[in-house]
Image (cartoon, helix red, strand yellow):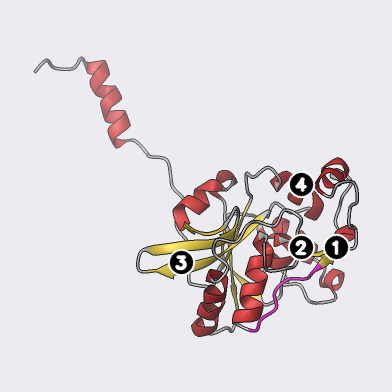
Amino acid sequence: MRSLPPAAWLLFLTLACGPRPATAAAPALQSGDLVFQTSRSRQSAAIQAATHSPLSHVGLVEVTAEGPFVLEAVQPVRRTPWERWRARGEGGRVLVLRPSGLTPERREAAVREALRHLGKPYDLRFGWGDEALYCSELVHKAYARGAGLSLGRQQALSELDLRALGPALRERYAGHVPLGLQLLTPASLAEDAALQVVSSDYDIATVLQRCADPAARGGTCRPLP
């Protein structure tokens, strides 16, 4: 076998022994955890602009013998393996929140409720019926119906920042934007006082900036750590 020249050996040793890129450590997930990310979907930028938050998608964790999955309302509602779900978000960043003081049994009940909706279509019009669902609606209903815990705060569409969304909204609603439509955003879920931070790849003070002043939410939002 022909020996390598000294320069080639030096390159080989540098690649073999040098520092390797760090990979993000996986959080200690439990069934019922809420996981948030900055989605790369077409409507992600609109959600971020309307809520002043990078959190544009949310799902619910189901831990199984095959590993963790995320129950999410996309097209359609589905179970996505955790690592695939995480990698789909911008930068692989994730915020993990968990209801405080809730037994594992009640969190599992919320997961079972979410599983009942598998296969349903994604709701592009953000209604509140069960025939189609959007991401934060699925998580809210799973906990409200499965565990008796109401998370997040419904807001009228007019309460969000719509300055950059006029044309897109008029197109989505055929020219008649329902400003009184009640909807629930990922940012609203993340602000709930019943949730505690398990792990975060985001700067918490930035992500939850609307909670910096509890009076802004009538004292109902989670205080910053």
* Quadrant of the frame with the C terminus: bottom right
Look at the numbered discs 3 and 1 and tell me whether their residues touch, using CB distance below 8 Å: no
Eye-nearest disc, 2 or 3 = 2
Element type where label 3 sits in the image: loop
Look at the numbered discs 1 and 2 and tell me whether their residues touch, using CB distance below 8 Å: yes
What mark, if any, has residue 46 been given in the picture?
4
Identify the amino acid type marked 4: Ala
Q: CA distance from mark 3 to mark 1?
A: 37 Å
Q: Which secondary structure is most common in the magenta stretch?
A: loop
What mark, if any, has residue 85 been given in the picture?
none
Q: Which residue is mark 3?
A: 28
What mark, if any, has residue 127 been given in the picture?
2
Q: CA distance from mark 4 to mark 3?
A: 31 Å
Q: CA distance from mark 4 to mark 1?
A: 17 Å
Nearer-N-terminus badge (4/1): 4
Eye-nearest disc, 4 or 1 = 1
Of residues 210 and 55, the one nearer the viewer is: 55
Nearer-N-terminus badge (3/1): 3
**Badge 2: residue crowd in 10 Å (few <14, some 14–19, many ≥20):** some
Q: Which residue is mark 1?
A: 181
Element type where label 2 sits in the image: loop
| Span shown in magenta | 148-154
Look at the numbered discs 2 and 3 and tell me whether their residues touch, using CB distance below 8 Å: no
Identify the amino acid type marked 2: Gly
